[in-house]
Image (cartoon, helix red, strand yellow):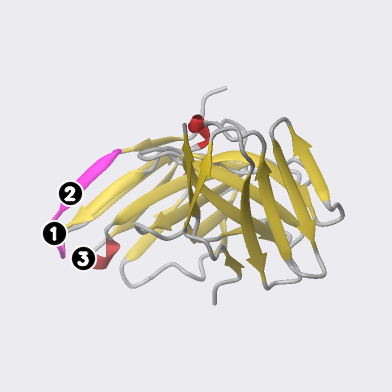
Amino acid sequence: DQQVKQNSPSLSVQEGRISILNCDYTNSMFDYFLWYKKYPAEGPTFLISISSIKDKNEDGRFTVFLNKSAKHLSLHIVPSQPGDSAVYFCAARSGGYQKVTFGTGTKLQVIP
Amino acid sequence: EAGVAQSPRYKIIEKRQSVAFWCNPISGHATLYWYQQILGQGPKLLIQFQNNGVVDDSQLPKDRFSAERLKGVDSTLKIQPAKLEDSAVYLCASSSLPRGIGNTIYFGEGSWLTVV
């Protein structure tokens, strides 16, 4: 049962343009959503998060949007840079013990 | 602040052998997680500790996997006997309490296991 889904396994974007990574979830008990970035041979690193009581959170070039009615969130990167090339994981938290469930990831390639 | 430390980074073993991975979380972090990431998939939670107690091990294959967190700090994850399908990256992560906005989990670099 895949509760967090990232339906696009890969995405290519030109440098300077916008990258949009999408994520869908099924569990309405999720109360917090996170995006992680992962380079090869490294562990995932935290990028940005959003509480379920908000619909937008912005941090520099990164903005996460949450649409609770659609159970959908997206990560926008503007402008995209070659160093952004990595695998991006969407994750969602639930429960009193903060169980975090990850999606399958989207590999972003930013072309110079 | 030191990050989550894991060892060994890489391990190759034959099927039916045993292996153990060690994790030292960020100082003061009460919650410790072990995730399994198979190539091309997202991290899957194997076990979650709150201090030295287990709060979730629903996806841990208990016939071959075991984990402990003595004294609520370091943790070890053991696989015995290993199967070919256990080839994966084993990620340790930790997070602090209390639960709240901005709280997140921090990962180590992972332990790469190849079972041949």
Circle 1 crowding by C-alpha within 10 Å: few under 14, some 14–19, many from 20:
some
Label 3 chain ID? B
Q: Which residue is mark 3?
A: B84
Label 1 chain ID? B
Q: Give the quarter of the figure containing the N terminus of chain A.
A: bottom right
> Sequence-wise, which precedes: disc 3 or disc 2?
2
Disc 2 from disc 1: Cα separation: 7 Å
Disc 3 from disc 1: Cα separation: 6 Å
In the rendered image, residues at marks 3 and 2 fall on the same chain: yes
Disc 3 from disc 2: Cα separation: 11 Å
> Against A33, is A84 above or below?
above
Does the rendering let one see residue B83?
Answer: no
Q: Tell me if A32 is positioned left or right of B61 in this view.
A: right
Q: Tell me if A51 is positioned left or right of B27 in this view.
A: right
Q: Secondary structure at mark 1?
A: loop
Q: Which residue range is magenta in the image?
A: B8-16
Q: Which residue is mark 1?
A: B116
Measured as percent of width and height from the top left, residue B110 is found at 38, 42
Does the rendering let one see residue B77?
Answer: yes
